[in-house]
Amino acid sequence: MTFESGPALLFCPADRPERFAKAYERADAVILDLEDAVAPDAKAIARTHVLASTLDPARVIVRVNAPDTAEFAPDLAMIEQSPFRTVMVAKTEDAASLDLFDDAFSLVALCETARGISRAAEIAAHPRVIAMMWGAEDLVASLGGTSSRGAVGTYRDVARYARSRVLIEARAQGKAAIDAVHIDIEDIAGLADEATDAAASGFAATACIHPSQVSVIREAYAPDAATREWAHDVLAAAEGERGVFRFRGQMIDEPLLRQARVAVARAGNRSN
């Protein structure tokens, strides 16, 4: 899959098949989750639900358990029998572990431990990886910490470092980057701020855990009217210029023109 359908990726527990269709309809893509959202004694039945699903694979990602767990082998065996070929690999820590998937699969490497973040560059370079995502809570737990956020609700420095590292390593390899979930469902303002920052920083999408968060993420990634107008106008002005030129009090060069093209593309995706 690509992320052109939109930026809101909604997790759905794989042991709740009655929610599959609703999640698929609400979000730009649905992540059927075999890992943390599913209790250990429900993982086997969750695999049968994924295998029986009739959702269009073009907008479905299946999150499997980490490669070093006992649940990974049956997850892989099931997914090979299914029509789904975009797989999110939980707690990716080693690029070599991704070789367990053949070339039919496109992988979203979820770096959410200290080891995974430290190896983000080699993971991003793996040929089957199409996107990278990071996770705050598992990361802090792997460090022996107790919370990813400070008293005012913003990420601690270590979480911001991991977020930036995954974004940079993913984009260095031409792969998409996905921002982590905002676990406080009631904190709409906080989610909007984080998603707006994610879009401005270069993330392709933001994952979420509740349908109510989808519209917030979509709105955050969509350029506002002023940005859309500036982008169209500056690109039109550039057609008659050579090199750097002045536009509405700014000196415009190629980096700003690339930003304008991104804004136009996102505005176009929103209207589709």
Image (spheres, rainbow, N blue to C red):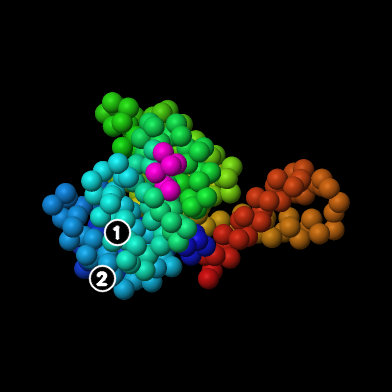
Please provide percent x and percent y for residue 180. Answer: 39, 45
Identify the residue at image location x=79%, y=57%.
237
Identify the residue at image location x=30%, y=41%.
68
From the viewer's side, name the closer residue of 1 and 258. 1
Identify the residue at image location x=26%, y=28%.
146
Label 1: how many Cα within 10 Å (few below 14, some 14–19, many 20+): few
- In the image, taking residue 208 as reference, residue 241 lies left or right, namely right
| Location of mark 2 (residue) | 52
Q: Magenta residues, as a range?
A: 94-99
Query: What secondary structure is marked by label 1?
Result: helix
Residue 171 counted in the magenta span? no
| Location of mark 1 (residue) | 77
Give the farthest residue toward the bottom: 54
Q: Is the magenta stretch mostly helix, strand or loop?
A: helix
Report the mark closest to the observer, 2 or 1: 1
Residue 98 counted in the magenta span? yes
Please provide percent x and percent y for residue 102. Answer: 43, 56
Question: Mark 2 to mark 1: distance in Å?
Answer: 14 Å
